[in-house]
Image (cartoon, rainbow, N blue to C red):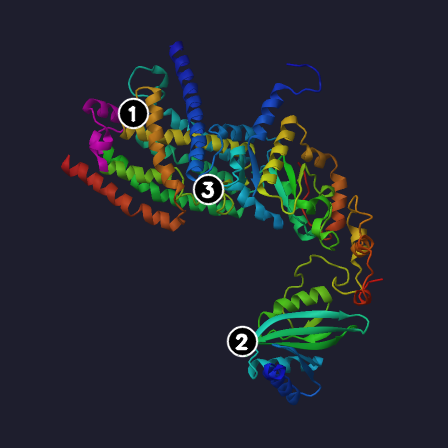
């Protein structure tokens, strides 16, 4: 009993460290790739570590009340909690990374991933800055947009595999020896297009870009709060990527395959975002409720009637 | 040859002298005509040249401070695109209580120039709408472009002295010393000392 | 680790290394020298390889670039932006107008010596300095941070009364919030 609890806690810590490191490295590598596309030498690929350490070493923390402390704390709580419910590795070989999985955790994750933005919205509301208020309303309206094709893709998956837990979906993929990517391609396409919105990259970054209303909700967060938000953003990126790989690409059986698969998947929104301008809020919502929703509905119908 | 070229400019001057009294004018050179009027005729002359003589484009308005004679001189510069002639309308304003009528209902962009002249010279344009502070903020000395505002003393009093530049203030004397030539006569007339 | 008081502790070395390799510059062009900032930040004279990137708000920025002359109207807003930034913060003075007044040395509306109003760490001279000179100024700032000598913010906090007296002499209508951190 005691050793299993200790192994669980160690596994928890190892997962957090792994997610933080991989997430921050991905951030730096994305900056390097962006620079090379723009025909210049970019920062070194460990640059984001320097950014986060510098932000944590700021000496004064200017805040406007206790709710502003709570905002980034809620954001990082949501990221780490979402991280706990995702199986990092497929199979039984590494007991450390099992964490907390249970039946129905896919529906739980749908709600937990929204919690982080709510925390930041609460913190930004306390500051009283009008830029933050407009940025928060834009970010939340965009979330209404991309949640719909995402939920449709997940519903199509859940109907096909008759289970609502991520481990169930992974077992379905190993028993049938295929990837869900090829089994229900329409759900994969809808999910991929929704994922473009979830990462808040161009063209859907109207809420967070520095030239849009001076960075939207984050305009009053500086120093340690910004460091916490960057950390939570990196961990959350890893969470989303791993979730996608587990559901659609069959999970990974060791860490190297996981890194390779998530990196290849991450290149889709990054490379599309480097060359895109920015959508306005209503244009992005109109895009998400157009083709991705239609493909999602078709995917659900395909599963119900043909399979 | 010269007479043929300045024919249309001379026509404009003669037309204006015939229409208004107390107006004197001359042709300065090709494409430039100069007219001097009284303060109370400003709006009627500007309206007339805009409607009847084709000077529809307003280029610039500026102000000259003749402190020795005791008046300001307002200069309105207009341009006629059809005949390609530039017209300078000059009016003298008393320096003690400067007050002129407002002409920005003829061309709307005159408002900006009038606001600048009000702030820099202190001329009051009666009936003009526009914010009080235009370029300078919280300025409580005399208007700074007037010639009795001594910039050197004001700068020395309010701002810090730049180190190492105490002996390099007069460029003209340095150039005279360096080249060994005399200051020519036309430059001595405008010298400040 | 050496134990004498002159050398730095290991914590300080790590902190200074993190601070010097990632500088966030406030995207605020105060004067006509701001036209040299976009060439420095974009592809040809890439400044991002040193870790320098632009940020939108004073709460998130480290470095304030005073690019050129400061009229008294702008000085009030610059002081307000400077006091909103969080410690440790640095100021770089661009161009000869911050050093001794430059082209506007006898103007009734611009300030001549920037160092008497807000503390300056590094000056870059030129009218306007070329992007290579700008990058060299940033490297000078990085070296000063690495040695622990860029203490402009502390100088401001300690001598606040003197700076305030100088600022009030030039700015006549003082309606700004107090500086309390």
* Viewer can see residue A25: yes
Q: Residues within 10 Å of mark 3 (few under 14, many from 20)?
A: many
Whichever of labels 1 and 3 marks the residue nearer the N terminus, that label is: 3
Q: Are the residues at dot 3 and dot 2 in contact (C-beta closer than 8 Å)?
A: no
Viewer-proximal residue, B9 or A213? B9
State how far apart marks 1 and 3 are (Cα): 31 Å
The image quadrant of residue C11 is top right
What residue is shown at x 44% (from left), y 44% (from top)?
A207
Question: Chain for mark 2?
Answer: B
Q: In this rendering, would A112 be left or right of C61?
A: left
Question: Chain for mark 3?
Answer: A
* Viewer can see residue A128: no
Q: Which quadrant of the figure contains the N terminus of chain B?
A: bottom right
Q: Residue furthest bottom?
A: B18
The image quadrant of residue A165 is top left
Span shown in magenta: A159-185
Tell whether position A53 is magenta: no
Marks 1/3 same chain: yes
Q: Residues within 10 Å of mark 1 (few under 14, many from 20)?
A: many
């Amino acid at each position: 009993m005691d050793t299993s609890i200790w192994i669980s806690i160690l596994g928890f810590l190892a997962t957090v460290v792994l997610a933080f490191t991989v997430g921050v490295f991905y951030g730096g590598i994305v900056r390097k790739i962006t620079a090379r596309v723009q025909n210049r030498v970019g920062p070194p690929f460990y640059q984001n570590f320097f950014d986060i350490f510098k932000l944590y070493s700021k000496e004064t923390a200017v805040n406007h009340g206790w709710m502003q402390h709570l905002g980034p704390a809620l954001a990082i709580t949501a990221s780490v909690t979402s991280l706990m419910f995702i199986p990092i590795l497929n199979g039984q070989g590494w007991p450390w990374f099992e964490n907390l999985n249970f039946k129905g955790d896919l529906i739980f994750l749908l709600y937990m991933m929204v919690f982080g933005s709510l925390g930041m919205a609460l913190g930004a509301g306390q500051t009283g800055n009008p830029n933050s208020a407009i940025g928060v309303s834009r970010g939340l309206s965009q979330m209404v947009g991309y949640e719909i094709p995402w939920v449709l893709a997940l519903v199509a998956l859940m109907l096909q595999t008759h289970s609502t837990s991520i481990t169930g979906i992974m077992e379905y993929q190993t028993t049938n020896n295929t990837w869900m990517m090829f089994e229900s391609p329409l759900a994969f396409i809808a999910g991929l297009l929704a994922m473009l919105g979830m990462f808040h990259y161009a063209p859907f970054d109207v809420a967070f870009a520095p030239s849009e209303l001076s960075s939207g909700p984050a305009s009053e967060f500086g120093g340690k709060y910004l460091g916490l938000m960057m950390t939570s953003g990196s961990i959350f990126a890893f969470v989303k990527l791993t979730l996608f790989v587990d559901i659609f690409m069959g999970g990974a059986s060791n860490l190297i395959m996981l890194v390779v698969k998530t990196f290849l998947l991450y290149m889709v929104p990054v490379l599309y975002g480097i060359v895109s301008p920015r959508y306005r809020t209503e244009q992005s919502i109109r895009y998400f409720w157009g083709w991705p929703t239609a493909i999602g509905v078709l995917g659900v119908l395909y599963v119900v009637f043909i399979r | 040859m010269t007479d043929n070229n300045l024919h249309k400019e001379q026509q404009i001057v003669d037309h204006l002298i015939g229409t208004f009294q107390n107006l004197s004018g001359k042709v300065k050179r090709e494409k430039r005509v100069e007219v001097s009027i009284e303060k109370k005729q400003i709006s009627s002359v500007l309206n007339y040249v805009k409607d009847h003589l084709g000077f529809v484009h307003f280029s610039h308005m500026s102000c000259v401070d003749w402190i020795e004679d005791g008046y300001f001189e307002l200069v309105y510069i207009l341009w006629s695109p059809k005949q390609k002639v530039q017209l300078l309308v000059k009016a003298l304003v008393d320096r003690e209580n400067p007050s002129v009528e407002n002409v920005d209902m003829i061309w709307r962009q005159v408002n900006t120039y009038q606001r600048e002249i009000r702030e820099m010279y202190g001329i009051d344009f009666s009936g003009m709408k526009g914010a009080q502070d235009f370029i300078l903020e919280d300025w409580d000395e005399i208007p700074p472009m007037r010639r009795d505002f001594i910039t050197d003393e004001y700068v020395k009093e309010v701002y810090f002295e730049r180190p190492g530049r105490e002996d390099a203030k007069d460029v003209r004397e340095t150039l005279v010393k360096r080249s060994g030539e005399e200051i020519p006569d036309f430059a001595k007339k405008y010298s400040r000392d | 680790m050496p134990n004498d008081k002159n050398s730095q502790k290991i914590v300080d070395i790590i902190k200074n290394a993190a601070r010097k390799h990632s500088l966030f510059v406030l995207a605020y062009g105060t004067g006509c020298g701001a036209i040299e900032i976009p060439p420095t930040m974009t592809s040809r004279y890439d400044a991002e390889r040193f870790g320098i990137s632009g940020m939108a708000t004073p709460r998130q920025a480290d470095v304030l670039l005073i690019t050129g002359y400061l009229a008294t109207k702008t000085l009030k807003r610059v002081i307000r932006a400077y006091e909103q930034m969080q410690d440790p913060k640095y100021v770089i003075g661009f161009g000869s107008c911050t050093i001794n007044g430059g082209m506007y040395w006898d103007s009734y509306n611009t300030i001549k010596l920037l160092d008497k109003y807000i503390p300056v760490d590094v000056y870059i001279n030129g009218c306007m300095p070329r992007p290579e000179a700008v990058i060299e100024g940033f490297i000078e700032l990085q070296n000063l941070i690495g040695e622990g000598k860029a203490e402009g913010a502390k100088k401001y906090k300690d001598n606040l009364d003197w700076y305030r007296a100088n600022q009030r002499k030039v700015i006549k209508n003082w309606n700004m919030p107090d500086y309390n951190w």
